[in-house]
Amino acid sequence: MSARIIDGKAIAEKVRGEVKEGVSAFQSTHGRVPGLDVILVGEHAPSVVYTRNKEKAALEVGIRGRLHRMPEATTQAELLAMVAALSADESVDGILIQLPLPKHIDERTVLLAIPPEKDVDGFHPINVGRLSTGQDALVPCTPLGSLRLLDEAGVNLKGANAIVIGRSNIVGKPMAQLLLSRDATVTIAHSRTSNLAGLCATMDVVIAAVGRAEMVKADWIKPGAAVIDVGINRIELADGKSRLVGDVAFAECKEVAGAITPVPGGVGPMTIAILLQNTLMAAKARARVSA
Ligand code: NDP
């Protein structure tokens, strides 16, 4: 039987609608709209597109989106000064520094400078710690979006055996924490995991966040399992064109899984939608503190 396809585009649209309503309610109560400030250093082509998309998406739901473009030669001190200015600005609820940064800037130092309450990417160690100790936190957008997809697909996580393939700080580890917080029994796999295929085949929920085109095959999937494909890989085709595929061999896995996300149109659209949700959440939390 063919799996239910989890429509990330439609679910992201639903999240944006919720945020839009929330922004309007926030404005009625507080007399201002939430503010999201995105900093881009340099000309990294995909980052230019991502940051423009973030600014545009913010404006579409009524958030004041602002993109700050800084030249490639920006020094760490200049970037820190920009972060300090936005941190002190009461109209700014979310600060996002687009990664990767140029090599001469230390990513950790700069990310640490963002106040945790404005850290809408959820990368600050305070937010990482809050998530792992079960406290309210700003959570990285991609894993939080993946969790929402599981919820929308009606996947029961309580007591489920879940595997997260990939242990990065921005996807794998927070994803595992989120699943744990929902009472799944979680395995985190990585490049040194032995018998990954066999292990995976025992799991009710599979999250693939690796960055290897179509690595997860049909015989890795337990019949009826829920499969979330975070991977984005561009592959070259014989005719010289290219296309995007995930970490999961979608065509064969959908014949075994119970529910599965496609690439594109699965996790991808959720990331920006959740960034907007995080910005609204940060604005509400800041308003509560200053009330
Ligand atoms: P990283 O490169 O930071 O991490 C990849 C992880 O995969 C590592 O933990 C690595 O293990 C593990 N891995 C690599 N090879 C294997 C293997 N053969 N078997 C098992 N595990 C392996 O990537 P990210 O977490 O940043 O991203 C993962 C994917 O998700 C990428 O394709 C990325 O483009 C995509 N992505 C998509 C987003 C979206 O919006 N949809 C947002 C963010 C990422 P080890 O630690 O041992 O090296």
Image: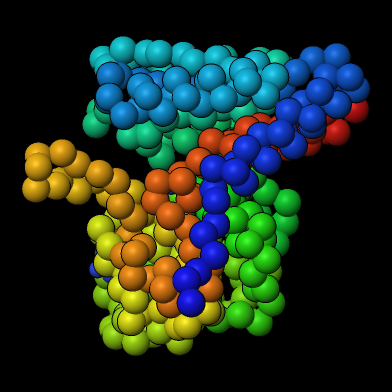
Q: Quadrant of residue 192?
A: bottom left
Indicate whether 8 appears above or below 118: below
Which residue is at a point 50% across and 41% down the rendered structure image?
269
Indicate whether 226 appears above or below 159: above
Give the x, y percent position of residue 151. Answer: 66, 61
Q: Nearer the viewer, residue 169 or 211?
A: 211
Q: Is residue 120 left or right of residue 17?
A: left
Give the x, y percent position of residue 107. Answer: 37, 36
Which residue is at a point 49% across and 15% down the rendered structure image?
67
Q: Nearer the viewer, residue 201 or 209?
A: 201
Q: Nearer the viewer, residue 32 or 54?
A: 54
Q: Is residue 92 left or right of residue 108?
A: right
Q: Is residue 285 left or right of residue 81?
A: right
Q: Nearer the viewer, residue 95 or 256?
A: 256
Which residue is at a point 54% across and 42% down the rendered structure image?
9
Residue 128 visible? The answer is no
Which residue is at a point 62% across and 46% down the rendered structure image?
11
Give the x, y percent position of residue 268. Answer: 46, 44
Give the quadrant of ligand 1: bottom left
Q: Quadrant of residue 158?
A: bottom right
- Taking the view exactly as shown, the residue that stands out farthest to the front is 1
